[in-house]
Image (cartoon, rainbow, N blue to C red):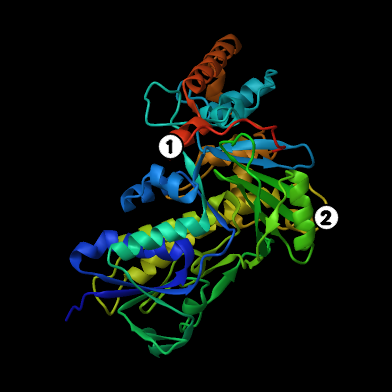
Amino acid sequence: MSRPVQTVVAVGFGAPLWLTVLALRKAFGAGGLVVRAVETAPPTPGLSHAGLPAMGNLHQLLGLSEVELARRCGAVPSLGQRFAGFSGDGSAFLHPYDTHGHSVDYVDFVHHWVLARRRGLKAALEDFSLGAAAAKQGRIVEGDDPARLSSPGVGLHVEATAYADLLRQRALADGVSVQQGAIADVERSGDRIDALVLDGGVRVEGDLFLDVGDGSLIGQMPGAAFESWSAWLPFDRVLPLAGRRLGALPAYAHVEAVDGGWIGLYPLQDRTAGLAVYDSRATDEAAMVRQAEGVSPLDWRQGEALVVKPGMQTRPWIGNCVALGAAAIALDPSDAAPMHALQAGLSHLVTLFPSDIDGGPEARAYGAAMAAHGRGLRDFQAMHYYLNRRSGAPWEAVRNLEPPADLAYKLRLFSARGVVPTREDEAFQPANWAACLIGHGVVPQAHDPLAEGVSEGEQIQIFQKILGRIAADVGRMRPLEAKLASMTQRPAAPAPAPLRFT
């Protein structure tokens, strides 16, 4: 006899926990689903979250407006990420959340750019991206305009504690109940959890248990196993930083490779959130803070370093326990991957929500979907590290490793033909890969022969027209500071002496 799931218990802390329970209440609350949160710790102080453009879709589904996020969480829109220093000091490129140019005679623009480069073109690929041009000029994309050259995506930077507080408030108002405390014991019958016992003695029962924490709950289930990716993703520490506000807010994040790791700068309205991501075998907290000052001297204050063990659970759904976020797929903060992994897990869980309390085929489907998504995110992160040209540990070691098989295939095919093999459900599409591969120095050796159907003179005219359209489109956009001022109903910040944001 079928017994529907009536109670879900989610275990974790911070924004991932509250996004999960709020999403489940929005999806299934009307059907009477009871959602309980077990908050095992407060949000990590000083941490920031970066979200890809798809995060905006989730916020819309949850009823969170960009105005509320700006006012309550200091949120700042972002059009991409700038990578610096990966090919040595002075190297840099922008990865926009956008395409480049437009296809010509059904041939992707990248192939026309490769051909033009052989003909003497000096302009970088990113010069032909509307999103990149807007980001560099501190402008922001708003609304849908079919007359624009493209439709750049808009990501988000948000302060983690305020974001978690807002989500928590919304979840509680929507009927989610909460218990606080560490898990002292797990009562289990075979591969099914009956109840959690917290350190204060409180017993929390449920039909379905979600691990949205550090993976310790799913990790103790029978048959659990962890696939480590630390060889390709060598950074095992994340140090939250907080610094002074940048003089003029850039519409992008900045990620700079340094000795032993990288420094990420994520502009917020009242300060700059930073992340020092590093290999603890090669460097330490003090050295990373000094290097952060070298990247941008903002009087950085440091929080407590977090341990990261990149990899994934090979079985993220066992019995009635399901892992989401870092409990299922653990990644470093590059490319806003952690929040995207959480969002992917939520999407798959809602789609595959069990129809029966005893479970069924959903676990296998969820595991396959999460494995494919996780490895795609891993490969995108590993690409940055494998293609580096820096000296010292761990940069040299990761460069000399054989990359994951799928990444190796992507690199070979793109290097040879300018083609990126991807699946539709991947977080990063061909335009994202092309921007980063070319930015890291992988320029295709050959182009699509059909591109030669456009003469050099015609090609010059097409490129000039694209650049003209980009300039006109960006000129009609509001400055990022003006948009934030309108959302927060405050005067635009005066322009102090610019702070270095290399």
Residue type at the position of mark 2 = Gly
Please determine whether, in this image, residue 266 is positioned above or below residue 46: above
Q: Counting residues from the N terminus, which is met first, the one under dot 1 or under dot 2? A: 2
Tell which of 456 and 425 is nearer to you: 425
Residue 395 appearing in the image: no
Q: Give the total number of marks visible in the rendering.
A: 2
Position in image of residue 259 (x %, y %):
79, 53
Residue at (40% x, 59% y) in the render: 167
Q: CA distance from mark 1 to mark 2?
A: 48 Å
Image coordinates for residue 130, horizontal then vertical, percent: 52, 27
Callout 1: SS: loop
| Label 2: which secondary element | loop
Which quadrant of the structure image shows residue 16? Answer: bottom left
Mark sitting on residue 489: 1
Q: Are marks 1 and 2 in contact (CB under 8 Å)?
A: no
**Residue bearing the label numbered 2:** 392
